[in-house]
Image: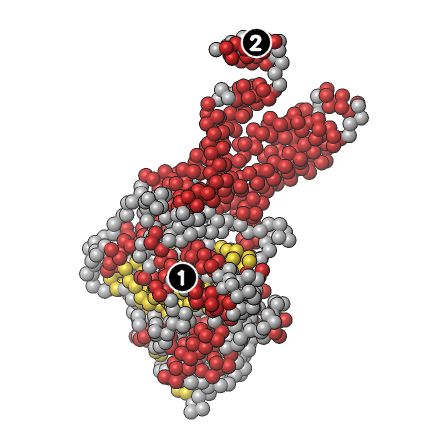
């Protein structure tokens, strides 16, 4: 009780009279980030999403430790985990999530799958964000023919048949020992990251460009101009920080779709090799030969993890959007 | 010949599949339990489906070198000699087909003379009598390099005047057609299996009036094959051969969706004692979902499977349910599944590494990935026992339970130059990132983990590349791209005909090394001159050759020949070591009760489509 009162006193000292019931009125004297946090932590769904993501990241980071506790790694094969027809055994005390066709532990592979999914999602989203934001700001701010070129490029990439193109690239890059583009794009994880990034940046670029178009007419940009700031400084020091909110929101929302994209590519047998555990690949293994009608565990567990992960990122993304941009509240 | 290929199966990913998985787990739809006792009668259609045609020569008989293609040709084409379409050794014995007898050979073994039966006509729209010139024309097509005859090595250099050239088909000096019913082959060297080579589809008669329109690029004639056998491609009678511009693809064959064969009205049963031709036709459709194919067979909407390997769930169901067992047909093929090591790619340019790989691979695990013992016998050497009679007791790298032996593998690796510290593991950087090529479909993908893990045990860390089976073959049958692949698990090899040489020349002779379309994936016997020509790096230690061993066996006949090729197999296993033989495959065919006569063709290694009978009264 005492503590509560003292906090209240602090707030009063700071010159912000508390008026219970109208949250936004508390705004006076608070930074936008403090405001954001206040709103965000009221959103229980977003918090659950955040907690789940932290858990998943922890699981991914601790995967080798968990494997050590279980006693075997993701690629260890157990002869007795398949029957005479090569069909896997179900969940047991040794294999909590059962085994797969090669006699590997589905539990350990699911845990390791989190690494692949998150790594691909973060890497690809990071690259896509960097490209998308840079090109979006340039297009929106400079305008003219630069804008035309970048906007048409966005149109072109968005109109490519995504899966077919991905299949094509991966086939082309799979054969040569050093992959494509002088080894930059290697089959496996790197190729998948490349494909996903290639197809995601335009969404961000488009949004950022729109925001910049309205921002560049604002007074503070004019002020910056009159004080002799260069174009690049204005773009990346004045405009960019104002875009933090939409970038964070859209990045968070792109991550789950990229996780699904990775799963889809792995499901189609593109890129990530069989020995790298990946949820999409595990789902593909389960649906190959309709194995899931027999070995339901091969589909259920990676499926649940995939579901929970994408759901968590979506909840978090929604929560972030609501908290950062109250006007868009449903 | 190469095995079949399968297209990429595309599925829709989504949580829906998860829901389906949980909603309908552990439910195996049962098949009919009533054994059909219907008499074997003519009529009906063999309705089947295949995940892809997997053709490597666009179905043109001159270049099509797949067992699957040969199976269809058994319905479509007749050759001088052919087979009875039955299982076992009898199914590998050539019989006269277009020829009146097995031919007469001169005392020096250099001249073979054949006479053609009367009243054998091409199917519509050609409808004329088949003459010896039509057979000679087939040989002329083999030598036109733009048509890419993939097994030309059986004829080039064997028949006088036969060699590849870049122009359209032209006269061959070593083949005489003194009259329309006689054909004479003049050989350069005695070749005892020469008659069997006349049973391959590339030598089937071809009407020049149609085929002259398809001299390049390769494969065009595959859309307009003129029948000589009991069946023709549906729509053949609609084709207008009056000029090249009026020839359109026959409607019954679409490489992306279907192959429909109907009876050839010009075929006369009395001239053909090899084919029963019970069914009125064949309806083969493409269904990329193998499980769907077997479900449809189980429900009776398809009559049986073709080349697809039944998934393990299907194998278990038909093996354990006594009422279903009669509908599962297990027949040993003349096929070896193997890991091919590339002799010009480090570290596999070192025989000790190749031997170590032979010791370490868990063949039992691989067999399990394929569905267990029903799918084949674990192979201890290269040639299936049906070829040269070398049986299962010869197994130079045999290990208890066939699961591999780490100690022996390490002992072998210690002798390798890539393990200078004698650690038992490959420590040289070349062993990191070795490309392992695989198909991107089960059961190949299911077997991959075991192979990768085994290789890692001796320090060979691979980068697995998974490609659609056609693309995988193209990668290794092109010397230049094949030279990037250290070890490949995608190929399999089946005998072309009942002679051990079909496991020798095509696979291990330097003659079979051609820039594109080689089947010597291990590049056995490559010379430095060849390497230069192909633009690949030649290993400093050279490449072992098997040419002289093959050439010493070729003139031999009978038991001598078998013994010689047994020695050749041992030479390969001990002195060259190009492969890790995994298993000798069985073809497991699942039929529905509508199939009243199942027949297995030992020659193709698949169901004998020309001899199967059904009771479904369906029209093609």
Of all chains, the one bearing label 1 is B
Give me the residue at 58% from left, 45% from top: A194
Give me the residue at 39% from left, 40% from top: A301
| Callouts 1 and 2 close, C-beta under 8 Å | no
Where is residue A327? Give x, y as percent.
56, 19
Give me the residue at 48% from left, 26% from top: A47
Residue B404 drawn above or below residue A316 = below
Residue density around tag 1, few if under 14, some if 14–19, many if 20 or more, within 10 Å? many
Residue identified by numbered label 1: B362
Q: Is residue B143 left or right of residue B195?
A: right
Is label 2 in a helix, a strand or a loop?
helix
Where is residue B26? Give x, y as percent.
29, 45
In three-dimensional space, the C-alpha distance between marks 1 and 2, rounded to whole angstroms, equals 74 Å
Residue B295 drawn above or below residue A226 = below
Front residue (pair B425, B307): B425
Q: Is residue A92 visible?
A: yes
Residue identified by numbered label 2: A9
Is label 1 in a helix, a strand or a loop?
loop
Tell me which corner region of the image, top left, top right, bottom left or bottom right, holds residue B330: bottom left
Give me the residue at 70% from left, 31% from top: A236
Q: Is residue B17 left or right of residue B86?
A: right
């Amino acid at each position: 009780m005492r503590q509560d009162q003292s906090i209240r006193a602090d707030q009063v000292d700071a010159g912000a009279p508390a008026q219970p019931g109208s949250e936004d009125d508390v705004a006076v004297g608070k930074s936008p980030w403090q405001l954001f946090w206040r709103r965000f932590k009221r959103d229980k769904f977003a918090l659950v999403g955040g907690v789940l993501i932290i858990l998943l990241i922890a699981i991914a980071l601790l995967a080798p430790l968990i494997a050590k506790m279980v006693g075997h790694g993701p690629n260890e094969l157990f002869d007795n985990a398949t029957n005479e027809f090569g069909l896997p055994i179900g969940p047991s005390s040794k294999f909590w999530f059962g085994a797969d066709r090669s006699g590997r532990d589905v539990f350990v592979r699911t845990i390791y799958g989190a690494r692949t999914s998150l790594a691909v999602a973060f890497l690809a989203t990071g690259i896509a964000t960097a490209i998308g934001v840079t090109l979006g700001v340039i297009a929106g701010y400079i305008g003219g023919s630069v804008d035309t070129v970048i906007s048409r490029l966005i149109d072109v990439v968005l109109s490519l048949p995504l899966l077919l193109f991905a299949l094509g690239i991966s086939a082309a890059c799979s054969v040569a020992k050093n992959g494509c583009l002088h080894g930059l794009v290697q089959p496996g994880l790197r190729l998948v990251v490349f494909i996903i990034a290639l197809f995601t940046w335009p969404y961000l670029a488009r949004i950022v460009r729109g925001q910049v178009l309205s921002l560049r007419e604002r007074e503070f940009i004019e002020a910056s101009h009159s004080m002799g700031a260069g174009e690049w400084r204005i773009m990346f020091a004045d405009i960019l920080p104002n875009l933090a909110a939409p970038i964070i929101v859209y990045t968070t929302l792109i991550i789950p779709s990229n996780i699904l994209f990775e799963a889809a590519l792995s499901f189609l047998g593109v890129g990530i090799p069989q020995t790298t555990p990946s949820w999409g690949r595990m789902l593909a293994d389960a649906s190959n030969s309709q194995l899931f009608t027999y070995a339901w565990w091969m589909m259920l567990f990676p499926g649940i993890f995939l579901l929970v992960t994408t759901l968590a990122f979506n909840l978090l993304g929604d929560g972030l959007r609501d908290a950062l941009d109250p006007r868009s509240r449903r | 010949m190469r095995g079949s290929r399968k297209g990429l199966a595309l599925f829709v990913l989504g949580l829906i599949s998860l829901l389906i998985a949980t909603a309908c787990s552990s439910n195996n739809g049962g098949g009919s339990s009533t054994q059909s006792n219907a008499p074997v009668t003519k009529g009906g259609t063999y309705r089947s489906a295949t995940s892809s045609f997997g053709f490597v020569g666009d179905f043109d008989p001159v270049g099509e070198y797949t067992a699957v293609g040969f199976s269809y040709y058994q319905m479509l084409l007749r050759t001088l000699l052919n087979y009875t379409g039955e299982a076992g050794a009898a199914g590998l014995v050539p019989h006269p087909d277009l020829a009146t007898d097995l031919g007469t050979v001169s005392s020096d073994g250099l001249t073979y003379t054949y006479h053609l039966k009367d009243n054998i006509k091409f199917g519509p729209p050609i409808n004329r009598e088949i003459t010896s010139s039509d057979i000679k024309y087939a040989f002329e097509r083999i030598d036109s390099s733009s048509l890419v005859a993939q097994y030309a090595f059986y004829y080039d250099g064997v028949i006088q005047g036969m060699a590849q050239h870049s122009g359209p088909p032209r006269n061959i000096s070593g083949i005489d057609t003194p009259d329309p019913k006689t054909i004479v082959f003049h050989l350069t060297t005695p070749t005892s299996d020469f008659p069997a080579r006349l049973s391959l589809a590339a030598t089937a008669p071809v009407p020049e009036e149609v085929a002259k329109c398809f001299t390049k690029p390769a494969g065009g004639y595959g859309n307009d094959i003129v029948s000589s056998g009991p069946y023709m491609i549906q729509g053949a009678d609609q084709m207008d051969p009056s000029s090249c511009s009026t020839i359109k693809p026959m409607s019954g064959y679409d490489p992306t969706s279907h192959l429909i064969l109907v009876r050839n009205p010009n075929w006369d049963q009395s001239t053909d004692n090899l084919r029963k031709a019970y069914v009125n036709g064949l309806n083969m459709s493409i269904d990329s979902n193998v499980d769907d194919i077997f479900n449809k067979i189980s429900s009776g909407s398809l009559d049986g499977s073709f080349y697809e390997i039944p998934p393990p769930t299907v194998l278990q169901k038909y093996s354990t349910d006594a009422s279903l067992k009669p509908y599962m047909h297990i027949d040993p093929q003349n096929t070896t599944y193997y890991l091919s090591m590339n002799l010009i790619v480090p570290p596999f340019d070192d025989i000790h590494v190749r031997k170590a790989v032979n010791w370490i691979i868990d063949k039992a695990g691989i067999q399990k990935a394929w569905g267990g013992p029903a799918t084949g016998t674990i192979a201890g050497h290269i040639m299936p026992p049906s070829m040269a009679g070398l049986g299962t007791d010869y197994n130079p790298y045999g290990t208890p339970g066939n699961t591999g032996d780490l100690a022996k593998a390490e002992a072998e690796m210690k002798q390798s130059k890539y393990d200078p510290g004698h650690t038992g593991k490959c420590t040289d950087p070349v062993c990191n990132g070795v490309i392992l090529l695989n198909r991107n479909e089960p059961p190949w993908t299911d077997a991959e983990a075991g192979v990768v893990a085994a290789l890692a045990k001796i320090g060979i860390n691979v980068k697995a590349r998974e490609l659609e089976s056609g693309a995988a073959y193209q990668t290794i049958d092109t010397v230049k791209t094949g030279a990037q692949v250290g070890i490949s698990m995608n190929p399999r090899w089946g005998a072309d005909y009942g002679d051990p040489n079909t496991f020798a020349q095509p696979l291990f002779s330097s003659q079979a090394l051609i820039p594109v379309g080689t089947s010597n994936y291990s590049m056995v016997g490559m010379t430095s001159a060849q390497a230069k020509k192909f633009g690949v790096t030649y290993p400093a230690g050279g490449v072992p050759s098997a040419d002289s061993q093959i050439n010493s066996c070729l003139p031999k006949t009978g038991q001598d020949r078998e013994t010689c090729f047994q020695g050749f197999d041992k030479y390969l296993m001990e002195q060259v070591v190009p492969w890790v033989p995994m298993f000798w495959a069985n073809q497991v065919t699942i039929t529905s009760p509508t199939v009243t006569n199942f027949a297995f063709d030992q020659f193709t290694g698949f169901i004998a489509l020309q001899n199967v009978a059904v009771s479904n009264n369906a029209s093609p």
